[in-house]
Amino acid sequence: MEVKNEKLVRMVNISKYFGEVAALKEENFEVGYNEVVGLIGDNGAGKSTLIKILTGVHTPDKGRIYFKGEEITYHSVERARELGIETVYQERALGEQQA
């Protein structure tokens, strides 16, 4: 099986502001082929905002997103799903409902 050196997902210099509040300032995030990545950080660090940008829920104010080496210029939830990008949210209430 061939292992690709390029990244599956690259988010470069991503910034997102909500009013005057900077949720993300020029952040970078990469996921390689066949990688499992944990995104961890303090409350308010911007993890959810970064993932919402990746999945098309939010539009970045600055930065670029690449998928399989190609820049995504028009990004939306629908486009992310077409590319196979989706979020599985970790919700305690969801687990309790299934128990």
Image (spheres, rainbow, N blue to C red):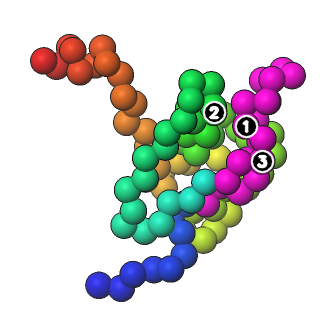
Percent position (x, y) of residue 28? 67, 53
Percent position (x, y) of residue 54? 58, 45
Which quarter of the image is occupied by the C terminus? top left
**How would you rate the neighbour count of disc 3 (Cα within 10 Å): few for under 14, some for 14-19, many for 20 or more?**
few
Amino acid found under the numbered disc labelled 2: Gly
Numbered circle sitting on residue 46: 2
Relative to 94, is 71 above or below? below
Circles 3 and 2: CB atoms closer than 8 Å: no
Numbered disc 2: secondary structure: loop
Please report the residue visible at 76 percent of the width from the left and 53 percent of the height from the top.
Answer: 13
Whether 25 is among the magenta residues is yes
Which quarter of the image is occupied by the N terminus? bottom left
Please say whether residue 74 is visible from this viewpoint: no
Numbered disc 3: secondary structure: strand
Circles 1 and 2: CB atoms closer than 8 Å: yes
Numbered circle sitting on residue 26: 3
Horizontally, residue 63 falls left or right of residue 66, namely right
> First in sequence: mark 1 or mark 2?
1
Please say whether residue 5 is visible from this viewpoint: yes
Relative to 52, is 95 above or below? above
